[in-house]
Image: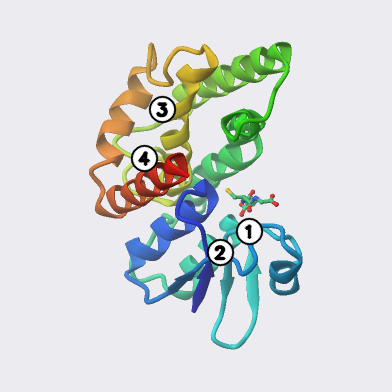
């Protein structure tokens, strides 16, 4: 299998955590021509990473579908609980991450790449991110995000929290862990999980390389 991947991407990182947890042999490749390029869109019409190319030629796009596929195909090291209720609990986090937590942060990314953003817009998005973080604080279990096992919930949240902790204060916000003790305890723990440690290191190295450019 081959993963169209960028080390900094939080969504690609989410799938890399699942791949590393399961010990799978997956070749990591940059999207040819770059994200959104005509060349890459011939492979993945969405132009986004991650996308997983199976050995039979099928392409699976979207981090959550990739992670669910890997879970179905390689269940030996599970990242979802066995019971339906536990699985629903994990999926509540992955959906919350994809639909509600990450988008207002992503809306601020252009500013990090030198684009001008309206102050009012920045303020609205910072407020929205903080409201979502408060919701996450209320939802979090212990020791892992969705309960007793390290799961796809932790895989989804950790790479985005890397961006939150690095960039939120740059937008005039308090840090993501300020006044959120459950989130702080989870963050301290999740960074020690080997797959997460590896991915956060990859994100950090990619961020440093990008800053040098
Ligand atoms: N919903 C997608 C989001 C993926 C995504 O937005 N990836 C970013 C990189 S972090 C990307 O490829 N952006 C380029 C674009 O949107 O054209 C997923 O879960 O995989």
Task: Look at the numbered disc 4 and say if its residue's Cβ is closer than 8 Å to ligand 1.
Answer: no
Q: Residue at x 61, y 31 (%)?
A: 114
Q: CA distance from mark 4 to mark 2?
A: 22 Å
In the displayed structure image, the side of residue 203 where residue 106 appears, left or right: right
User: Marks 3 and 1: in contact by CB < 8 Å?
Assistant: no
Q: Residue furthest front?
A: 213
Say which label, 2 or 3, has the lower sequence index: 2
Kindly check if marks 2 and 1 are in contact, taking CB atoms under 8 A apart as contact: yes
Task: Give the percent coordinates (x, y) of residue 124.
Answer: 68, 15
SS for callout 4: loop
Residue 94 placement: quadrant: top right
On whether ligand 1 comes within 8 Å of the CB at mark 1, the answer is yes
Which residue is disc 1 drawn over? 62
**Residue where numbered disc 3 is placed:** 165
Of circles 1 and 3, which is in front?
A: 3
Disc number for residue 66 = 2
Which numbered marker is on residue 147?
A: 4
Q: For the residues marked 4 and 3, what is the alpha-carbon distance in whole angstroms?
A: 23 Å
Q: Of label 4 and label 2, which has the lower sequence position?
A: 2
The residue carrying pointer 1 sits among few (fewer than 14), some (14 to 19) or many (20 or more) residues within 10 Å by Cα, namely some
Mark closest to the chain's N terminus, 4 or 3: 4
Tell me the CA gap for discs 2 and 1: 6 Å
Marks 4 and 1: CB-CB under 8 Å?
A: no
Image quarter of residue 25:
bottom left
Q: Position of residue 154 (x, y in %)?
A: 41, 44
């Amino acid at each position: 299998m081959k993963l169209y991947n960028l080390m900094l991407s939080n969504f690609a990182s989410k799938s890399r955590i699942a791949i590393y947890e399961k010990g799978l042999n997956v070749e990591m490749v940059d999207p040819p021509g770059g994200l959104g390029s005509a060349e890459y869109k011939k492979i993945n019409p969405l132009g986004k990473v991650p996308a997983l190319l199976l050995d039979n030629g099928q392409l699976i796009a979207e981090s959550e579908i990739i992670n669910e596929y890997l879970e179905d195909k390689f269940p030996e090291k599970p990242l979802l609980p066995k019971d339906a209720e536990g699985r629903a609990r994990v999926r509540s986090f992955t959906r919350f991450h994809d639909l509600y937590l990450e988008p207002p942060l992503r809306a601020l990314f252009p500013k990090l790449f030198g684009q001008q953003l309206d102050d009012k817009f920045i303020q609205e998005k910072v407020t929205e991110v903080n409201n979502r973080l408060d919701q996450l604080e209320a939802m979090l279990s212990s020791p892992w995000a969705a309960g007793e096992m390290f799961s796809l919930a932790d895989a989804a949240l950790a790479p985005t929290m890397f961006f939150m902790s690095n960039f939120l204060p740059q937008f005039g916000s308090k840090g993501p862990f300020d006044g959120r003790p459950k989130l702080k305890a989870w963050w301290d723990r999740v960074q020690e999980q080997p797959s997460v440690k590896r991915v956060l290191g990859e994100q950090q190295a990619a961020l440093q390389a990008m800053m040098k450019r």
